[in-house]
Amino acid sequence: MILVTGGAGYIGAHAALALLEAGEDVVILDNLCNSSREAIPRIEQLGGRRVEWVAGDIRNRALLDQLFVRYPIDAVMHFAGLKAVGESVRQPLRYYDTNVGGSINLCQAMAYAGVFTLVFSSSATVYGDCSCMPINESTQCGQPTNPYGQSKLMTEQMLASLGSADERWRIGVLRYFNPVGAHPSGLLGESPRAAPNNLVPYLLKVASGQLPALPVFGGDYPTPDGTGVRDYIHVVDLAEGHVNTLQYLRQHAGLRAWNLGTGLGYSVLELVAAFERVSGVSLPLDRRERRPGDVAQCWADPTRAFEELGWVAQRDLDTMMRDAWRWQQANPMGYEETARPVPSTASLAAQAQGAG
Ligand code: NAD
Ligand code: UD1
């Protein structure tokens, strides 16, 4: 059985489904701070099987110890964390506590339980501001410039130390580029609790009339049309990469990092054009100055993942936009419209006690 921390969230939910589809049993641990319990029955519906799930926090060691006793967990996929860059600048301790402290707590509980196989959600942000494209796993350009990025790098370093100290560990570090899109059913997608900051969630709010115009940050980057270039990857491709990683780790000990990206860079304006093409919706644009902290361009060399994991992204930009739009139209307010009320802390604790 696979423990999926953060499995009610955007990427974790798609990964939990991919695991079910691969024949794995899944237990989800999520405190719902940025997600909805409504994701769980939808994962079950799509996967055709029951998912165990526990409402709780990765920083709660006693709860983790209970989980490892109660379920026959043999590997962990660790998605739980906080991910808003701007918020991390304002609330650094919260980010280091959850992302670094939570990961340390999880690894301690794993070692105590004798579970040593871990897939960790890292980010291309660990490469810092790189000018040499594409980025491969050995690229060393600099440091992340914000606490969120630092927390990912620190966790990677902690995991590397762990891998060196104890040969029982099997750790896959996955550096995501820009995950977008949604499950083609329209049942799973990104449903952030706060106002969107990232390009595609913002674009979807504009397309559905909830926000007036899409800000385009920067028109003077050294890119073909002057707007920022990124490696957008379909979240279902990303999820499938996790299953391949798990299969690799079952055969290989040690720690290894892989980029999960398509290897293709698209500008903001190219992404907007793709969305307009597949949706038939015209997006009002609001040209702005560069957003502080943004890099001009960032795309992956995904060769290592292809050669070692046998994984390659299959879905193109039009598919990403089509699936994102289907999700938005079917769930204009994310999961919230259909979700039951978020439970109180007391009821979460009670559920954690009697999980399952
Ligand atoms: P998300 O916010 O949708 O999912 C994270 C989940 O973790 C949420 O369901 C949240 O409720 C849960 N969570 C947060 N803190 C927790 C805690 N202390 N205990 C238990 N659960 C907790 O985000 P996502 O986009 O699915 O990202 C998943 C992981 O991938 C994160 O670690 C993120 O940093 C990383 N990542 C995301 C992106 C991206 O663009 N989405 C890019 C690179 C890396
Ligand atoms: C951001 C984070 C990164 C994190 C990732 C996923 C920053 C600096 N980086 O990546 O650490 O891993 O999100 O959470 O925040 N854009 C617009 N208008 C918008 C929003 C974005 O033009 O309203 C542009 C940006 O300038 C950029 C591109 O769209 O060129 C992608 O932006 P975004 O989706 O926020 O992702 P990143 O900045 O690449």
Image (spheres, rainbow, N blue to C red):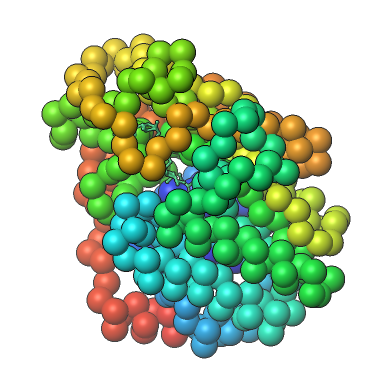
User: In terms of image quarters, where does ligand 1 lie?
Assistant: bottom left
Q: Tell me the residue at 69%/33% (across/down).
A: 302
Tell me where residue 41 sits by quadrant: bottom left
Q: Position of residue 332 (x, y in %)?
A: 23, 38
Q: Give the camera-side residue of 276 and 99.
A: 99
Q: Position of residue 263 (x, y in %)?
A: 62, 27
For the question of whether residue 230 can be seen, the reply is yes
Q: Give the camera-side residue of 160 and 170.
A: 160
Q: Give the camera-side residue of 13 and 82.
A: 82
Tell me where residue 66 sits by quadrant: bottom right
Q: State whether residue 322 is above or below residue 16.
A: above
Q: Tell me the residue at 50%/73% (across/down).
A: 102
Q: Tell me the residue at 44%/85% (across/down).
A: 353
Q: Give the camera-side residue of 10 and 143.
A: 143
Q: Is 110 displayed left or right of 289 in the figure?
A: right
Q: Is 216 displayed left or right of 109 in the figure?
A: left
Tell me where residue 276 sits by quadrant: top left
Q: Position of residue 17 (x, y in %)?
A: 55, 49
Q: State whether residue 24 is above or below residue 284.
A: below
The quadrant of the rendering that contains the N terminus is: bottom right
Q: Tell me the residue at 25%/61% (across/down).
A: 340
Q: How many marks?
A: 0
Residue furthest to the bottom in view is 62
Q: State whether residue 174 is above or below residue 350.
A: above
For the question of whether residue 36 can be seen, the reply is no
Q: Position of residue 295 (x, y in %)?
A: 45, 35
